[in-house]
Image: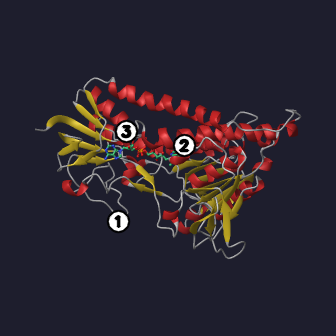
Amino acid sequence: MATTYDAIVIGTGQAGPSLAVRLANSGMKVAVAERKRFGGTCVNNGCIPTKTLIASARAAHVARHAAEYGVNIGGSITLDMKKVKERKDAVVHRSNDGVEQWLKNTENLTVYEEHARFEDARRIRVGTEVLEAGKIFINVGGRASTPPLPGLDQIRYLNNSTMMEVDFLPEHLIVVGGSYVGLEFAQMYRRFGSQVTVVEMGKRLIQREDEDVSEAVKTILENEGIAIRLEAECISLKKHGDKFAVDVDCSSGDKAVFGSHVLLAVGRIPNTADLGLEKAGIKVDQRGYIIVDDQLRTNIDGIYALGDCNGRGAFTHTAYNDYEIVAANLLDGDQRRVSDRITAYALYTDPPLGRAGMSETEVRRSGRKALFGKRAMTRVGRAVEKGETQGFMKIVVDADTKAILGATLLGIECDEVIHSILDIMYAKAPYTVIQRAMHIHPTVSELIPTMLGDLKPLD
Ligand SMILES: Cc1cc2nc3c(=O)[nH]c(=O)nc-3n(C[C@H](O)[C@H](O)[C@H](O)COP(=O)(O)OP(=O)(O)OC[C@H]3O[C@@H](n4cnc5c(N)ncnc54)[C@H](O)[C@@H]3O)c2cc1C
């Protein structure tokens, strides 16, 4: 016998809990299934713990450079990695527990701490029970992918989840993968005091960014003593005494990198293979992402997919925005759509990269007439005062409509500054609105109007 609900939410990542509570508060009888830890990736082994660890790493970095600011600390800077992890665990626990209590204390909502699997398009098995509902919301997220690299099965390696248990300082961390997750860990561990090598298959780091961004981020990391091996097309791994060897056979440099620990950061895959989607007839694409329309509906009536598992975003804010879109359509009569949102994300290296809209490369490829502005952080007073002048800001504007097409800000505070541009883009206002705005001095943001006042045609 199935227990009947109005709605079932599978997964408690960044969309599921808010949606479940909204539905329950609207009077619906709601079931939520979570097979692991409440809060999903972001809370337990993604954004929150990594940014907490990055804060410890930055504290160490600032302390090491204190003398440059006239501050004498005396003695060498050492890390208590157990304390670093304890601090991270406390922050994670607060969030994770918050989500659990929120769900368990919401009226009309029942929590099942089980793996959920479709029996058919209306019924879900959770452990020994079967639940039934006319509306089912899939928010199962993703996990680190493990590519079939030669030798990987012979060694012990880390990924973003197992990194969360590390409470010691690796002597030499080899990070396989030179993109967002890998680079954040690379800089973090370098600042903790490890030797770090990043091994990347491609010709450059963070390949979805413009070439000048990849190059600048590489320089920033190399300036801190991180070794970077690009074009490592033939990565294989093996044990080498009590260490590990990663064969890279790159076009230049040593053929192998020897390290004490290996972190695999080579992309993510959706948690959709063990959901019984085929029993419900739900379609996925070639990479396993659930196919959804602009309002996050799957091909089966009444079934929606939100967050990383639908391949329409790979961030906490895109997953949360998915919840807002579904709730607006179902409960508010507000026809919000995925296509309404503007690309936005940050890379939390230090200095961070803030991105909004199209990159310079994408604008060039589009062939449209555009205006372009770029400013080195060495010309930003606030950055000079802080002694943190690495990076640059650049912006691309449509020459005809004056709409901002995109911005790439790599520099101190740029994960925050990008929002002044993002909000103008959402307001669909011309760039001249920001150009004429009076910003506060001294800030990084005050240079945005200056940069916009000095646009040149994008040749
Ligand atoms: C190291 C790292 C750093 C990151 N940093 C950032 C950042 O700074 N900013 C940012 O925006 N994004 C960041 N992300 C990405 C972000 O964490 C994800 O985009 C976000 O968590 C996606 O949320 P979600 O709701 O789609 O799924 P998830 O958070 O992955 O949650 C899915 C949940 O579903 C559960 N589940 C799965 N299958 C089942 C099942 N069959 N039955 C029951 N439960 C199930 C899982 O246990 C999990 O709890 C980072 C990711 C990583 C790995």
Q: Mark number for residue 164?
A: 2
Q: How far apart are the two marked residues, 2 and 1, measured between alpha carbons? A: 30 Å
Give the residue type that dot 1 points to. Answer: Gln
Horizontally, is 172 left or right of 16 in the view? Answer: right
Asked whether, in this view, residue 14 is left or right of residue 183, the answer is left
Secondary element at image label 3:
loop
Q: Is residue 457 visible?
A: no
Ligand 1 is within 8 Å of the C-beta of the residue at disc 1: no
> Which amino acid is tagged 2?
Met
Determine whether the residue tagged by mark 2 lies in a helix, strand or loop.
Answer: helix
Dot 2: within a 10 Å radius of its alpha carbon, few (fewer than 14), some, or many (20 or more) residues? some
Label 3: which residue?
A: 12
* Residue 286 numbered tag: 1
In depth, the one of 17 and 394 nearer the eye is 17
Find residue 323 and report its image quarter. Answer: top left
Does ligand 1 reach within 8 Å of label 3's beta carbon? yes
Query: In front here: 143 or 294?
Result: 143
